[in-house]
Image (tube, rainbow, N blue to C red):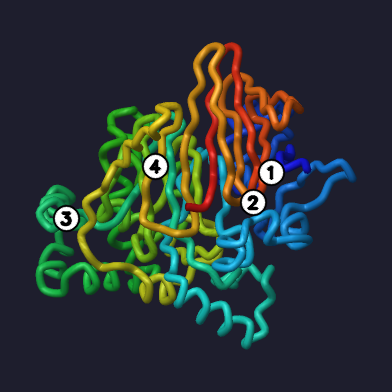
């Protein structure tokens, strides 16, 4: 019985996306819209399309027809659905300051908004589903992000270096992370403008003159204002740029975002694997719905030491596994050299995306070729061999 199937993901045209990376990767023509994300999974918002002998079918329906056969008994019993969502991101403009809820809080929030009669498609809805959203990202090139609060010493030093923000230092010493962050996020728009406008008037000209480094918060704060009127209200998310860690991630390295860690992607391309959810609580730097009150309820108010995950080689030395302590998903990258092969067996539904080169998938001597940008899935019990004549690189999403 066939257990390997081609599939295609769904493109999301969010405003912060780039114009060329994802179209070039997928081999399609740009259409003038921003190409921000390429979703691969069974989320109700944008399920992937699977090609079967009987035609095309949405991945969520493909699973629902026989979840135990597709997912395997263990995953089906524990989750009852595909527990992860796989993405390619092209971040041209910085994403929103955001945090993800725990599973328990997501369930509460989802039920609460349902009871209030807020449509799932409503722009002001916070909880799109009842799931948590831990996530891991692997950089496809140099990638920049904000990740958690700076440690105490670095934060105090940072505030001293920025004259416009020096007044926050005694507030931080007295009230800690929570008191300081709540203070800036609950400022009125007029108060925020009065604080931030002198700062932006100082750093934006430096940005335009290419005098700022990406390792400096001034760079990202100024970038967030480019293209906007000098009289426009300033986004309170700018405060976060100065309070959070600025992290540079090199190609092939990963960062894990657990529930409650405030973060924002700033620039670059990345693979991302997360729990099957679209729950995002936003606090600024976005045109999407911002709910500061809800954001502040779920943040972990503690210093965060960014951890760069290098990945560990599997025993066969052809697969790099990015370990993180979640039961929903497991991300790895497979590298094949010239005339190389790797035999695998799937215990549940797994998604594969070819990043570079060409790979042949041999299932019981039925061979199909996949090139850069193409994808296939395997269901529980699938036994198959990957082969490449000139070398290939693939990312794999699975459940542990």
Q: Which comes before the other along the chain, label 4 or label 3?
A: 3
Residue under pointer 2: 41
Residue at 41% over, 43% down: 266
The residue nearer to you, when weighing 63 against 140, is: 63
Question: Gap in Å between the C-alphas at discs 1 and 2?
Answer: 7 Å
For residue 9, the mark is 1
Q: Which comes before the other along the chain, label 1 or label 4?
A: 1
Q: Which comes before the other along the chain, label 3 or label 1?
A: 1
The residue nearer to you, when weighing 77 against 141, is: 77
Residue at 61% over, 64% down: 76
Residue under pointer 4: 322
For residue 151, the mark is 3
Q: Quadrant of residue 278?
A: bottom right
Residue at 52% over, 77% down: 107
Side of 88 relative to 196 (left or right):
right
Question: Gap in Å between the C-alphas at discs 4 and 3?
Answer: 25 Å
The residue nearer to you, when weighing 108 against 303, is: 108
Residue at 69% over, 26% down: 370
- Give above or below for 248 relative to 71: above
Q: Which comes before the other along the chain, label 1 or label 2?
A: 1
SS label for mark 3: loop
Residues at discs 1 and 2 in contact (Cβ within 8 Å): yes
């Amino acid at each position: 019985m066939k257990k390997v199937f081609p599939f295609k993901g769904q493109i999301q045209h969010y405003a912060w996306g780039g114009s060329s990376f994802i179209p070039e990767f997928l081999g399609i023509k740009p259409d003038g819209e921003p190409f921000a994300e390429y979703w691969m999974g069974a989320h109700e918002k944008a399920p992937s399309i699977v090609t079967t002998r009987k035609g095309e079918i949405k991945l969520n329906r493909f699973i629902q027809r026989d979840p135990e056969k597709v997912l395997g008994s263990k995953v089906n019993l524990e989750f009852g659905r595909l527990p992860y969502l796989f993405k390619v991101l092209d971040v041209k403009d910085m994403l929103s300051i955001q945090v993800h809820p725990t599973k328990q809080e997501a369930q509460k929030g989802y039920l609460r908004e349902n009871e209030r009669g807020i449509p799932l498609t409503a722009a002001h809805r916070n909880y799109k589903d009842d799931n948590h959203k831990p996530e891991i990202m692997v950089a496809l090139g140099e990638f920049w992000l904000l990740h958690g609060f700076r440690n105490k010493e670095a934060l105090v030093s940072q505030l001293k270096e920025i004259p416009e923000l020096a007044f926050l230092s005694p507030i931080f010493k007295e009230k800690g992370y929570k008191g300081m962050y709540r203070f800036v996020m609950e400022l009125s728009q007029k108060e925020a403008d009065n604080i931030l406008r002198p700062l932006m008037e100082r750093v934006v000209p430096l940005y335009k003159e290419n005098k700022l480094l990406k390792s400096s918060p001034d760079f990202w704060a100024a970038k967030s204002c480019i293209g906007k009127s000098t009289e426009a209200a300033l986004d309170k998310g700018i405060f976060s740029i100065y309070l959070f860690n600025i992290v540079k991630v090199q190609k092939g390295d990963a960062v894990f975002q657990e529930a409650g860690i405030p973060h924002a992607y700033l620039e670059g391309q990345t693979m991302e694997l997360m729990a099957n959810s679209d729950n995002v609580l936003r606090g600024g730097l976005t045109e999407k719905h911002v709910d500061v009150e809800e954001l502040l309820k779920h943040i972990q108010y503690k210093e965060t030491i960014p951890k760069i995950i290098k990945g560990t080689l599997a025993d066969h030395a052809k697969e790099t596994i990015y370990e993180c302590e979640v039961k929903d998903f497991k991300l790895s990258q497979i590298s094949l050299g010239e005339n190389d092969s790797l035999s695998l067996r799937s215990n549940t539904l797994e998604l594969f995306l070819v990043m570079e080169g060409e790979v042949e998938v041999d299932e019981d001597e039925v061979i199909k070729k996949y090139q850069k940008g193409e994808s296939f899935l395997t269901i529980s019990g699938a036994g198959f061999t990957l082969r490449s004549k000139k070398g290939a690189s693939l990312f794999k999403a699975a459940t542990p």
